C-alpha cells in the first residue's frame, strides 16, 4: 500500500508543470529552471521534470544567474 505522500506526489508534479506552462506564455517571466531551483529542487530533479538533460539545465541556470 502506498503512503499518502506517494499518492499526492504525481498530482503536485502535474500542478507545478501546469503553472510553468502558464508562466512560459507570459513575457518577462523567469525561466522554469530557475523557479524550480528556487523551490528547492536539484538539477537532476529539474531535468527529469522538464524532460531535459542535466547539462542543459545547468547551463540555463548559469545563464539565468548571470543575467544573460
Image (cartoon, helix red, strand yellow):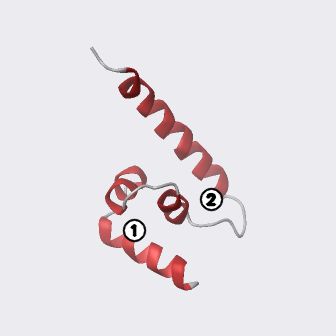
Q: Residues within 10 Å of mark 2 (few under 14, many from 20)?
A: some
Quadrant position of the N terminus in the picture: top left
Residue 25 locus on image (x, y percent):
67, 58
Instruction: Label 1, secondary structure: give it.
Output: helix
Q: Which mark is residue 24?
A: 2
In the rendered structure, are the residues bearing label 2 and label 1 in contact, judged by CB atoms less than 8 Å apart? no
Residue underneath mark 1: 57
Residue 48 locus on image (x, y percent):
34, 52
Q: Quadrant of residue 41?
A: bottom left
Q: Is residue 10 left or right of residue 35?
A: left
Residue at the farthest top position: 1
Residue 24 locus on image (x, y percent):
62, 59
| Vertical relation: 27 (above or below) 48 | below
Q: Which mark is residue 13?
A: none
Q: Residues within 10 Å of mark 1 (few under 14, many from 20)?
A: many
- Tell me the distance, in whole angstroms, between the alpha carbons under discs 2 and 1: 16 Å
Instruction: Label 2, secondary structure: give it.
Output: helix
**Residue appearing at x 58%, y 43% in the figure:** 18
Q: Is residue 15 left or right of residue 56?
A: right
Between label 2 and label 1, give the one nearer the viewer: 1
Q: Nearer the viewer, residue 42 or 25?
A: 42
Q: Nearer the viewer, residue 67 or 5?
A: 5
Q: Quadrant of residue 43?
A: bottom left
| Dot 2 or dot 1, earlier in sequence | 2
Residue 22 locus on image (x, y percent):
66, 50
Residue at the farthest left position: 1
**Residue appearing at x 51%, y 55% in the figure:** 39
| Vertical relation: 60 (above or below) 52 | below
Amino acid at each position: 500500500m502506498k503512503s499518502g505522500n506517494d499518492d499526492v506526489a504525481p498530482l503536485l508534479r502535474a500542478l507545478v508543470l501546469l503553472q510553468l506552462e502558464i508562466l512560459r506564455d507570459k513575457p518577462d517571466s523567469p525561466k522554469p529552471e530557475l523557479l524550480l531551483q528556487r523551490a528547492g529542487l536539484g538539477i537532476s530533479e529539474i531535468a527529469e521534470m522538464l524532460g531535459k538533460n542535466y547539462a542543459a539545465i545547468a547551463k540555463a541556470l548559469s545563464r539565468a544567474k548571470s543575467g544573460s
